[in-house]
Amino acid sequence: MGEGHSNTTGHGARGPTGGVKGGPTGFGTGNPNRGSGWGVSQTPYGPLHNYNPSKFGHGNRRGGNRGGHAGHRGNTPNLSQRPELQVAIVPGVAVPLSLVASEWGLTLFKPKMVAAALDLALTRLGMFVMDAAPYVGRFAGVVGMLLAPSEIAKDDMSVIRRTLVTLPAERITSVPFAQLPTQPAVVANARLHDVVQDGVQKIAVVKSKHVPIMVPVVQAKPTARPGVFTVQILNGMPPIHIHVENSSPPPDTAQPTGVSEVRDSPVTPVFSPLGNNSHDAIVYFPAEANTDPVYISVTTVLMPEQIERVEEENRQKQAKWAASYPVEAAQYQLSQAGDALVREQHNIEPYRAALEALNDTWEGQLLSDPDEYPLSYEFDDYVYMWGNYGYHFMFDIEIKNREDLDNLLNLGGEAFDPFPDGLSQEDLEKYGDYAGYIMQELKIEQYNLLREHLLVHQDKIDAAQLALDPFQYQLDIAIDAVNNAEQHLTQVRAQLAEAENARLAAVAAERQRVENARLAAIAAERKRVEDARLAAVAAERQRVENARLAAVAAERQRVENARLVAEAAERRRVENARLAAEAAERQRVENARLAAEAAERQRVENARLADDLARQQAVIRDNTFSLPAYPIGGIHPPGLAAAGVGATVLSPRVAREFSAAFRVALARLSTIATTSLAGPMAVIIGAGFYSSNEGEGSDRPLGWEKPTLVGSFPVSGMGLSPATPLPQQGEIDLPIRMLMADKDDWTSVYAVKPDAVQVAAKVKVVAAQFDPLHGVYTFTTDNQPPRTFTFTPARAPGMDIGTALPQPAGAPDFPQHTGTDITFLATKPDMVFLALEEGDFHDYIIWFPADSGLEPVYVYFKTPRDEPGVVTGHGQRVSGVWLAGAGKDLGVPIPAQIADKLRGKRFSNFDRFREAFWQEVGNDPELAGQFIPRNVTRMKHGRSPRARFIDTVGGKRSFEIHHVKYIRDKGDVYNIDNLHVITPKRHIEIHSKKGE
């Protein structure tokens, strides 16, 4: 129960001033006597949680006399009048319960967490698969608690010891709570029940695959006291009073005296738990209780003699079960033996590994098999006699076979004396007096040292073998038990096969008897059939004659009927021919009319197709840009192009100023580390101004006549390291990105430092294709509408802004744009704050074939957010608080009533749409009623409402509109069904997860 809870006051977890007031926290810590007068009294049945505000709570606080008058005993509640204060309980903890003045009750706390022991038991049993043989005809159970035997041996039901456990109902049954009032009992996945094992009464979680478990459903009935209900669980006993506690923290979950938790208990087979010791029910409460249904189990604690009687009954049931399921019983015995074998194999492993580790050393190998693993090493050392004079000794130490090893261990180094008969005169002459004796002593000493080392290692091996022997003994016993269980299972199966063969023989004999009786019956039946046949033949002859006479009469009648039918058919034929002629004439007239209508529809369709073709050509014209191509090497001015015209040439002064502003911005932004940015940084470097006409809401909204602008820079001037490789496809990080943004009748150009969160540094790299028909390089984007760029050699400067270079020879002939005049100026490169995101950028790096001699070019243009559009889509009907889910998943959809007001309207850019959208929300009584007055005022002025502080990030404080399908992925800009409202924090999370 590791999750802690604070004893808080005020709204939610805050007091009137916003601070958190708390006492001891957690189910497993703190004092159960805390708060509101709850305390513990020690009883013969264990500790009892009860209500005593005088003893455990605040007591009498009037004046300074805390204890009241002399002799006053405090305000201990009368449990006969308020039995629900007898004991406090949380899920999974067993508490004692007994009658007090013929009443009993409890206070129910509502945490969803369950005490560890029963939680583990429920989890383990829920994961258990009951297909194993030992569970045929039995239940599976996992023990969670042990109960001490009752010391009260009376027949008075009021003093019989009981324990009570509660669990959340959803841990017991999968039946929806709404169906409980209609069911007297429901099927349970598991239930709590007492079982007796090894002389101990236990509370276990049990379930069965073959026997459905039905748990009664009981209604909690209100009493005159608020929040107190009565529940009838035990027949013949008073109802239990239950108080549902919603405000106080739960008491300590420690088990009372007489109850012990059991953890990690295995799943074991148990017999039917349906008895008289445990009673349970699922209790549902009225709505005013504000609590979910709860499972309650009451168990009577058995006396020692009752436990012995139940154990004897279990032994009888086990014997009966084994007789009914001999194969399953043998399989269970084998399973138990197998589990014991696994345990013994686990127990012996470290001792066996220790022995093997010693035997695998060179010492162990030498001691075990010197013939296979002989030892040989060279002794090499100097022995100094006096001054610098001495001897250099080199000789081999060898144990080559079993004989050498036995001699070494039994006789020592003397067995390897190089001079066993003493030094001969020849040896003295060869080695010298001192050298010969010293070598003799050294060699004997080296063999003795080896002998001591091997004896120590042999002692270690003997000790390891001694430690292994008892475990080996237990393992052998476990192996024998498995073998015996397997033999027993084989014998049982053989006995069953023998019995089955006898049964089959009896069945075959019975079948033969039945077959003989059948053949006799067939013979009798044949005789009866033959007699019946002869009688039938005579009857058939009479029937045939009768039929012949009837047929003659029928044929006469048929001939007459045919004559009458033929006459009627001829009359119908003549009439049908007349009707067919009239119908053919009507069909001819109708076909002529339909042909005329089809010709008219084809004429109208041809006109519509011609109209569509003209509009498509206009779209291509309005989205085609001619940009200069930059030869490799040299310094090139920035490029600028307007839709449908040639490259727009900047005057020399404007071109120099624009290039200088860009270089200043690049230098300034390159000094800023990306990791220090709280958001993208922008520097304005230029602006293009237009003449303007009509505004929003007209057939030609503000900006309709503005040609779309596109800018370009040589990639070498974008601050990219010369060593940076440029992929032919994919993406590449740029130190800065360019942005075009519309504002009324001008377009501003910004250099932006990405922050890697709201604006990424990645720019798509694409390839231009050579168009041999027109002699230009082209590239077409994959967004809607598609935009096509053509690249031609740059013309000489000198023409004023607004003049267009002629198209290259053979280039497509597009009508010239005549809607507005453009004036472009370079501006002072000032740092500005823009609330940017990845969707505001639309740029590419376009490279040319190696034989073109052209440098890759960086192209940027306005996002589709800045393009005019017409609102489409229908939104969704919303209920409840509209923006309640704006901080989750993809936010919330646009309400249908707002979509209805905006559908079909034209807007010059998405900012104008956003203003109109929030104004409509602010003017909608149903939606505006869900916002605070300050946010309603903001919306009526076309501004987004503020989000909660926890849903904001940095300077982003207002709700945002999110395109579900990204604009760069061809998502519709003005389609209501592609738009969701979302909090700033969630918006950033979405784009960060997708790398945007």
Image (tube, helix red, strand yellow):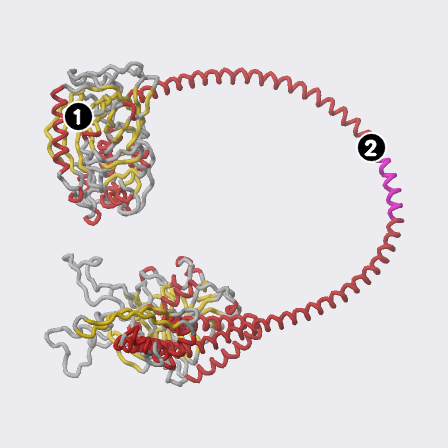
The type of residue carrying mark 1 is Trp
Q: Are marks 1 and 2 in contact (CB under 8 Å)?
A: no
Residue receiving disc 2: 557
Q: Residue 504 carries which label?
A: none
Magenta-tinted stretch: 538-555
Which residue appears at 23% of the width and 73% of the height? 383
The x, y position of residue 276, in whole percent, is: 45, 76
The x, y position of residue 325, in whole percent, is: 56, 71
- Give the CA separation, mark 1 to mark 2: 104 Å
Residue receiving disc 1: 746
Task: Classify 487 as above or below 740.
Answer: below
Task: Classify 652 as above or below 356.
Answer: above
Q: Quadrant of residue 612?
A: top left
The type of residue carrying mark 2 is Gln
Report if residue 526 lies within the magenta region. no
Q: Crowding near pointer 1: few (<14 within 10 Å), some, many (20+)?
A: some
> Is label 2 in a helix, a strand or a loop?
helix
- Our reading of the magenta stretch's main secondary structure is helix
Classify the position of the N terminus by image quarter. Answer: bottom left
Q: Would residue 269 appear left or right of 548 to someone viewing this image?
A: left
Mark earlier in primary sequence (1, 2): 2
Q: Which of marks 1 and 2 is in front?
A: 1
Task: Classify 839 as above or below 307.
Answer: above
Classify the position of the C terminus by image quarter. Answer: top left
Q: Is residue 747 or residue 527 the one in the foreground? A: 747
Q: Is residue 664 or residue 499 the one in the foreground? A: 664
> Is label 1 in a helix, a strand or a loop?
strand
Which residue appears at 87% of the width and 39% of the height? 548
